[in-house]
Image (cartoon, grey):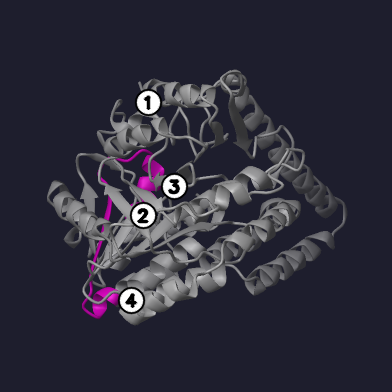
Amino acid sequence: MSQTVEKKQDTRNAVFRVFLAACALALQIWWLYAQISKLTAHFSGAAPIVSGVSVLIALIIYGRHMNAAMKLVWIFLVLAFPFFGVPFYVLVGLNTSTRHMRQRYEKIDRVLSRYMKQDPEVFLSLERADRQAANQFRYLKDYCGFPAFRNTDVDYFDNASDAFEAQLEELRRAREFIFMEYHAIEQKQAFSRLHAVLRERAAAGVEVRIFYDEVGSMGFIDRDFIGRMKKDGIRCRVFNPVVPVLNLFMNNRDHRKITVIDGKTAFTGGYNLADEYFNITHPYGHWLDTGVRIRGDAVRSMTAIFLENWNAIRHDDTDDADPSRYLALRPYTSLEKGWCQPYADSPLDEEHTGENVYMNLVNSAEHYVWFITPYLLITDEMSRILGLAAKRGVDVRIITPGIPDKKFVYCATRSYYAYLVRRGVRIFEYTPGFCHAKQAVSDDKIAVCGTINLDYRSLYHHFENGVLMYDFQAVRDMRHMFEDTFPVCREVTEKYKKRPHAIRIGHGLLRLISPML
């Protein structure tokens, strides 16, 4: 049976490395647990010391600048199961192993930031058009370093297959360079078509780079993939390869989906380069995914986002000493007059960009704000903001899958329904199958499309990207997509307004562990 990215048959080499890495973590936790148990068995005063240490660690966790739900699950583990929770938090929760990665990212970001300057007139024109929208763009400009652009056209694809066909056509016209970064690549029908185009363009002298996440592509790519790409003149790198030693940075995966062509055209959205995204295979019914094509000045930010991960992931790679030729603005005259702001999110800083963009969108909504997401595992802050918007009269709707890819996560997703629907949020489940799109639209004016799920993985642990857009036809096209999708969904709003006490308890446990999923 064909499998999705989230539920796939593993290739032997990748799974073995993951298995060894998991064993390394388990071995260290077991060793610390054994030492603590031995200590308490031989010294009567050790147990109170361990309890005292667990309380101290709980206080340290409480004082950290992190999400309250994530604090809660760690505090619960440390206090309820100190012999397990304390060593587990020391090895995993502190996550000090990312320090060197942060330094590498800061180094490349300092280089790229020289090319990410805001054109003052572009932003002033947005302020004059809509101050409230400008404030949303201002957040990404001032706190995340992503400028707003005009002289850009955005095309929205409500079907990943259409986006893929447009992508192939644009790739065939490449003359300078092709950059591709994807969470998952599958060596089957869709990628075979793509590979043929990339091979032909590389033979014609176009610089072609492919960057993929090893865990995301596990089971999809064999060990000879990079070698075959190299023979075809395609440079290939792997994000954060799994190694058989403990490396807690492994928890931070590259979930971005980016194609950049000649610095003129870029694609992003929810889809990876695997057959199920284009409904070539149907493991979970009809697969719903979407994407956008960007042409013009805003492509510069997409190029910079790609170059960040490509250059920062390994210290022994040969990096781009001078990225200026890739980041120069190309001549372009747009057909539309909207404002576009591609952005990225990183788990290595304390700025939760993806979640903040979504919350700003909800806070600014006047008439409606609609979301579609494959998973709904959200923070108390996000839940409260969605509920508050509904209470003040905003039409708040969320579409989630009708057929799950992971049943446990599906149950956890449903555990969040009750709080939301009691506050006026409407929940719909996509009955034809699995919806993998990640997007939101509000008031026919502003929208977001990208890779960011409404779950803890995307919002706190993964490298992500998105596009904030204002006053484009693509925004209105996205609204039409929602309007076409609601009729094929089942609304479950009334069903979850009242729940038996046993289900409430189960949902409470699921929400408690959701930050770990």
Question: Circles 3 and 1: CB distance less than 8 Å?
Answer: no
Name above or below for residue 230 compared with residue 121: above
Q: Give amino acid for label 1.
A: Ala
Farthest residue in the right direction?
Answer: 43
Residue 389 position, x and y percent, is 29, 75
Residue located at (33% from left, 47% from top)? 437
Helix, strand, or loop for circle 3? loop
In the image, the segment drawn in magenta is 389-415
Name the side, left or right, on which 7 lies relative to 13.
left
Q: Earlier in the sequence, mark 3 or mark 1?
A: 1
Residue located at (31% from left, 73% from top)? 387
Which residue is more in the foreground, 45 or 390?
A: 390
Instruction: Say if the magenta span includes residue 383.
Output: no
Q: Give amino acid for label 3.
A: Lys
Which residue is more in the foreground, 54 or 219?
A: 219
Instruction: Give the alpha-carbon distance from disc 1 to disc 2, as whole Å.
Output: 22 Å
Which residue has dot 1 on it? 190
Q: Which mark is residue 449?
A: 2
Which residue has dot 3 on it? 264
Q: Earlier in the sequence, mark 3 or mark 2?
A: 3
Which residue has dot 4 on it? 364
Image quadrant assignment for residue 338: bottom left
Helix, strand, or loop for circle 4? helix
Residue 481 visible somewhere in the drawing: yes
Name the side, left or right, on which 253 lies relative to 376.
right
Q: Earlier in the sequence, mark 4 or mark 3?
A: 3
Looking at the rendered image, the disc whose residue lies closer to the viewer, 1 or 4, is: 1
Instruction: Say if the magenta span includes residue 391.
Output: yes
